[in-house]
Image (cartoon, rainbow, N blue to C red):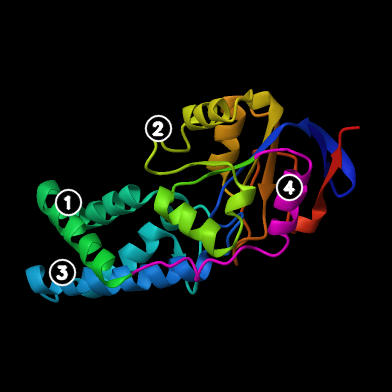
Amino acid sequence: MATLLLRGKPIGSIHGVLFDKDGTLSHSEPHLLDLFERRLTVICDLWSETKGAANLRELKITLRQAFGIRDKALHPGGTLAVAARQDNLTSTATVFCIFGCSWPEALALAETSFQRIDQQFSDDGTSRPLLNGAKTFLEELAKASVPSAVISNDTTKGIHTFLEHENISSLVVDCWSADDQPRKPNPEAVLQLCGRLQLSPHQCALIGDAETDLQMAQDAGIGCVLGYLGGWQIRPELTGTKHQFEHWNELELEAAP
């Protein structure tokens, strides 16, 4: 157990910490913007192959809106930033429906698009570096024997690739991914992850960058909920918690005597 300090003031006693990944631990925005542009190219090429060039400009605009692209930035609460791969695939199919496809056809086109992208685009973890100061805090938790876990809508492979590339696998004892059921933001995901840590939710802190993270934490009975603001070009609008911070050096631990 340790006392969590925010800007030098105690905000709660904790036995464990759950972390979101993208935009909280990792600087994911450049990677996600690049992924979107690759998806957009593949989707538009496939649309042209099957439907012709009609409505292509409008399709691009709608896809940008659907995924939360704002000029050259990513909306931190948008589909691409927050949702799992399957949700993004469903969003793509929904856009196809807007442009006249039946649902079976739209879903088939979306699945073909994502399969092509998977074949062309490999993620070795290098494009999502750890945010400045996060490793120091993880090391403080480990030193105080306070376990850390990741709860993310990335895949299990994606989470472990990131942890291994950033040399922090030894600092994170467990994870809950898009491969687990239910996925976040279902509060049951938090409850089950806490159960695997052998901790009650009220003994834990959860740190996330999206309103859905914060609401999920509160619904699950997490004892200390914190909103992280420093992971995106567009500052997240978080109203679900009074505890918010922008730099990892604003957090400290005071170990129990």
- Residues at badges 4 and 1 in contact (C-beta under 8 Å)? no
The spot of residue 124 in percent (x, y) is: 43, 67
- The residue singled out by tag 3 in the image is 47
Residue linked to disc 4 = 244
Alpha carbon distance from label 4 to label 1: 39 Å
Question: Mark 1 or mark 2: which comes first in sequence?
Answer: 1
Type of amino acid under label 4: Gln
Q: Residue at x 22, y 53 (%)?
A: 93
Q: Which quarter of the rendered picture does the N terminus lie within?
A: top right
Residue under label 2: 182
Q: How packed is label 4: few (under 14 Cα within 10 Å), some, or many (20 or more)?
A: many
Q: Point out the frontmost of discs 4 and 2.
A: 2
Where is 132 relative to 138, above or below?
Answer: below
Which residue is drawn at the image coordinates 15% and 69% (left, top)?
A: 47
Q: Are marks 1 and 2 in contact (CB under 8 Å)?
A: no
Residue stretch in magenta:
122-147
Residue receiving disc 1 = 107
Front one among 73 and 97: 73
Q: Magenta region, mostly helix, strand or loop?
A: loop
Q: Residue visible at 67% across and 60% down?
A: 230
